[in-house]
Image (tube, helix red, strand yellow):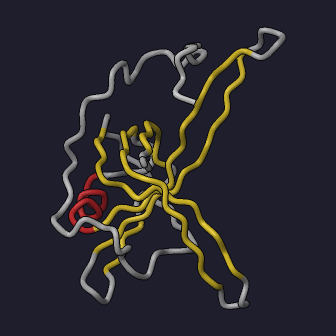
């Protein structure tokens, strides 16, 4: 079984960082990925998806020091699902990317932002041995985002 996410996109906010009672450090930020395509009339269209990314321990500290709103980054991790009950006793559900690695693809100055929900404890599956920001260099990172390639050898 495999739960793996790879994203290249821009940060929508500066990372929000918290230190938990357990001593763990957690960073949360939103990032946008965009895709361009031509519609049936030949007009160029662009769609943007927003993702919430959570980083733990050393990776969170690196995010706090170096990541800024608007930066282009490469993130690798897995999908996680959270739920919590707010102060009005309403259940809230979240889908997040639990980052295992990220790489800054450019440096950019920016403002700050924030969010409403934040994890309150480290997930049981988190790697306790520390994190690395070393990831393979993605191919053609700054290339054209044209139509996706069509292949017939899909594994499903």
Compared to residue 40, the image places residue 127 above or below, namely below
Q: Where is residue 84 in the image (x, y as percent from the top left)?
A: 59, 80
Determine whether, in the image, residue 64 is placed left or right of residue 50: left
Determine whether, in the image, residue 37 is placed left or right of residue 97: right
Determine whether, in the image, residue 60 is placed left or right of residue 8: left
Tell me where residue 25 sits by quadrant. Answer: bottom left
Compared to residue 9, the image places residue 68 above or below, namely below
Q: Where is residue 35 in the image (x, y as percent from the top left)?
A: 60, 28
Question: Which residue is farthest top?
Answer: 42
Residue at image position (50%, 48%) is 31
Tell me where residue 148 sits by quadrant. Answer: top right
Compared to residue 121, the image places residue 48 above or below, namely above
* Number of numbered tags placed on the structure image: 0
Q: Position of residue 33 (x, y in %)?
A: 54, 38
Report the quarter where the C terminus lies.
top right
- Front-most of residues 35 and 78: 78
Question: Which residue is farthest left?
Answer: 129
Q: Position of residue 97 (x, y in %)?
A: 46, 55
Compared to residue 21, the image places residue 108 above or below, namely above
Residue at image position (37%, 18%) is 140
Question: Which residue is farthest right?
Answer: 41
- Front-most of residues 71 and 147: 147
Residue at image position (19%, 52%) is 132
């Amino acid at each position: 079984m495999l739960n793996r996410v790879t994203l290249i996109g821009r940060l929508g906010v500066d990372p929000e960082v918290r230190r938990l009672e357990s001593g763990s450090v957690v960073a949360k930020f939103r990032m946008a990925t965009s895709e361009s395509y031509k519609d049936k009339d030949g007009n160029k269209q662009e769609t943007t998806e927003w993702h919430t990314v959570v980083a733990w321990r050393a990776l969170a500290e690196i995010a706090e020091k170096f990541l800024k709103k608007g930066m282009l980054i490469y993130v690798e991790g897995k999908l996680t699902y959270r739920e919590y009950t707010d102060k009005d006793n309403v259940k809230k559900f979240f889908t997040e990317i639990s980052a295992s690695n990220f790489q800054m693809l450019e440096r950019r100055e920016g403002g700050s932002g924030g969010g409403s929900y934040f994890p309150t404890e480290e997930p049981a599956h988190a790697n306790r041995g520390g994190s690395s920001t070393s990831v393979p260099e993605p191919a053609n990172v700054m290339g054209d985002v044209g139509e996706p390639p069509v292949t017939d050898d899909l594994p499903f």
